[in-house]
Amino acid sequence: MSRKNHLSRAHLAELRAALDAKRAELLREHDENLSAGTHTEEVASDPMEVAERATEEDELIGLASQESTELSEIDRALAKMAKRTYGVSELSGRPIPLERLRAVPWARFTADEEEEEEREREREKRR
């Protein structure tokens, strides 16, 4: 199979639906997290309550950051679909197997390449 057409139209439609659904889910969660963060109008006088709210706010910020990263990856995958480069490794140009794309529709690399990238990041952290 060639790099351009290793995924059928049906597979692309299935994966696009998965990306769209995950994107909608992340946007919904993001909105819910923002709403949860705005319900703290009362002034807390108890130091424990202040600490709990600070912890909750930190968690919301972390979630927002993670959601933002995932949304960026999904948007990148959707853009690649539009350019007809979806499903091809950004490192090697090899096709990303359908099974991997079903598990992680926004995958940018094959599983082997992703593992190697993670090992390299770990080596860099230790230096």
Image (cartoon, rainbow, N blue to C red):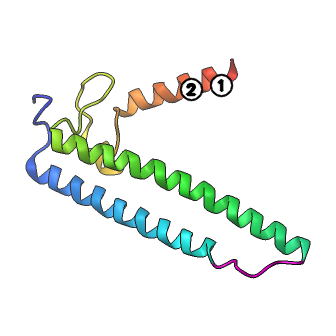
Dominant secondary structure (helix, strand or loop) of the stretch shown in magenta? loop
Name the image quarter holding the C terminus: top right
Q: CA distance from mark 1 to mark 2?
A: 6 Å
Give left or right: position of 12 versus 107: left
Residue 117, position in %: x, y?
47, 26
The residue stretch that appears in magenta:
39-45
Position in image of residue 82 (x %, y %): 17, 44
* Element marked by disc 1: helix
- Whether 42 is among the magenta residues is yes
Which numbered circle lies on residue 121? 2
Q: Position of residue 3 (x, y in %)?
A: 15, 29
Dot 1: within a 10 Å radius of its alpha carbon, few (fewer than 14), some, or many (20 or more) residues? Answer: few
Measured from the top left, where is residue 54 in percent x and y?
76, 64
Q: Is residue 32 above or below residue 98?
A: below
- Please report the residue visible at 33 percent of the width from the left and 23 percent of the height from the top: 91
Label 1 sits on residue? 125
Residue plotted at (35% across, 60% down): 23
Q: Secondary structure at mark 2?
A: helix
Q: Is residue 105 visible?
A: no
Asked if marks 1 and 2 touch (Cβ < 8 Å), the reply is yes
